[in-house]
Amino acid sequence: MEPLYLFNTLSRKKEKFKPLKDKIVTMYNCGPTVYERPHIGNLRAYIFADTLRRTLEYNSYKVKQIINITDVGHLTSDADTGEDKIEKTARKKRKTAWEISHYFEKLFKEDIKKLNIKNPFKFPRATQHIKEIIELIKILEKKGYTYKISDGIYFDTSKFKNYGELAGLKKKKFIAGARVEINPEKINPTDFALWKFSPKDIKRQMEWKSPWGIGFPGWHIECSAMSMKYLGKTIDIHTGGIDHINIHHTNEIAQSEAATGKKFVNYWLHVNFLKVEGEKMSKSLGNIVTLEDIEKKGFQPLAFKYLVLTSHYRSEMNFTWQAMESAQKAYNLILETISSFNLSINLYKSLSINRQLSILHSSASREILNIINDDLDTPRLIAKLWEVLRLNENLKFKKIFVLKADKILGLGFKEFLVKQKLPAKIKNKVLLREKLRKEGKWQEADKIREKILKAGYKIEDTKQGPIIKKVVIKKLIK
């Protein structure tokens, strides 16, 4: 088997993957803050995490995966200031914070289902783990890593030797350019909140009693507490966007390793930004795009997933509507092509010898592993898929390769193949057309072809016989 190599942000190089336990992988993926619908940049991170999981499973690993739900504690500023994003949305929409978080969690789960993203082992919510969060802060307090100021309990980053290692910055440089907003009470600019006190003049909807006072958890501590509870003190893989590296993931490492004295994560993987028409997505520019927006324009969610997979996860991606239209057409063409595998009439002789089938399976798996095990190279895998569909004449190998590749890509090819069956009525028309062609009755044969096309099938004539393809009709709204 080809070894799996992954780019580790911590070492800044591709490393041969070796799990803590043989054939079992623990993986934590930073989940959504459920105060609004995820945009396509957010969704790219979960497509990437899903591809990683599928690749691990293709390599015969069993994956224990967590995607957390941040439903409290994520403030409008990374400097631990501002309003809680969920409470802010609740106030604007005149709903409870619980209604807001549950509603947007539901939308998030609907979106990832449309993208054929596998569900994790658990979707733990931060609000369900207050007890674990408080216990973790107590450990840090006992070890001397915390201090109290007027608005909460903070982690003293100067006491953690390797703070900033993930970001690749030396401590002095890291602290000097750490934040724009500085709380003058903090000992170091990079110190971060573990527990925030509820404001005295404002009644929060989400708040809990703690040894330090009524309040709510900081954003970073939630992930450490949930990761440790379900996956252990040290885990194999942690993923997120590159915007998480400098603060969120750096702080996760500090608090986790300070508490346990053990390495928190062996492999850190980060997905790059997705821009829209060359610009960063923002409310001020009015260019935020959601999966719902894509569907309203007549595109399929899996065509968007296809588009994402044509770009390597570590490369910056630029989304345009023109690229989306091209992706939809390419995706449709793949579906039309693979539909011919089950719709062909006496086109190829089937392989009856198990040994021949075994050779084809091994050949397909070897080619896929050679590509995908090089740091999840989905663009190369898609290019190889097209090469097989266009150039390889062995129908059985094509079908095997498509099904195996889709175990990585998750583009719904298997489901499409299973569903395709040539109706008897169409089959009879195809056979009649072949008879007319052999008799030289070309005009009558052409009329039959037109009738078949109107019924949703098209014919491609080859030396071996006719190939019948299901026409994929998808209206594209400009």
Image (cartoon, helix red, strand yellow):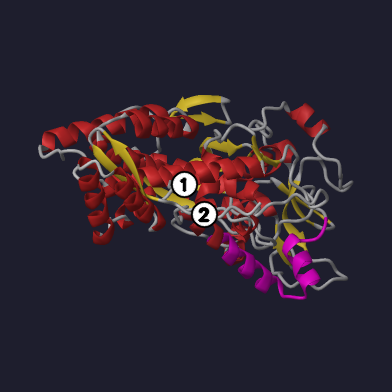
Instruction: Please tell me whether residue 169 is drawn above or below residue 179 in the rendered image.
Output: above
- Label 1 secondary element: helix
Foreground of the two, 83 or 259: 83
Let me know if residue 97 is in the magenta part. Answer: yes
Q: Amino acid at mark 1?
A: Asn
- Taking the image as drawn, is residue 348 in sight? yes
Residue 102 figure quarter: bottom right
Q: Give the residue drawn at x 41%, y 56%.
A: 454
Foreground of the two, 147 or 86: 86
Lateral position of residue 344 relative to residue 114, left or right:
left
Where in the figure is residue 139, as x and y percent of width and height? Answer: 61, 52
* Location of mark 2 (residue): 474
Lateral position of residue 370 relative to residue 465, left or right:
right
Q: Which mark is residue 108?
A: none
Q: Give the residue drawn at x 71%, y 56%.
A: 74
Foreground of the two, 131 or 321: 321
Where in the figure is residue 31, as x and y percent of width and height? Answer: 59, 53
Foreground of the two, 67 or 340: 340
Q: What is the total number of numbered labels drawn onto the structure image?
A: 2
Q: CA distance from mark 1 to mark 2?
A: 8 Å
- Taking the image as drawn, is residue 24 in sight? no
Instruction: Please tell me whether residue 194 is drawn above or below residue 400 in the rendered image.
Output: below
Give the main secondary structure, helix, strand or loop, of the magenta stretch.
helix
Instruction: Please tell me whether residue 405 is drawn above or below residue 452 in the rendered image.
Output: above
Asked if the residue under mark 2 is in contact with the one under mark 1, i.e. CB atoms within 8 Å, the reply is yes
Label 1 Cα crowd, 10 Å radius (few <14 / some 14-19 / many 20+):
some
Image quadrant holding the N terminus, namely top left
Compare marks 1 and 2 and give the one earlier in the sequence. Answer: 1
Segment colored magenta: 82-109
* Location of mark 1 (residue): 332
Lateral position of residue 131 relative to residue 401, left or right:
right
Where in the figure is residue 132, as x and y percent of width and height? Answer: 57, 60
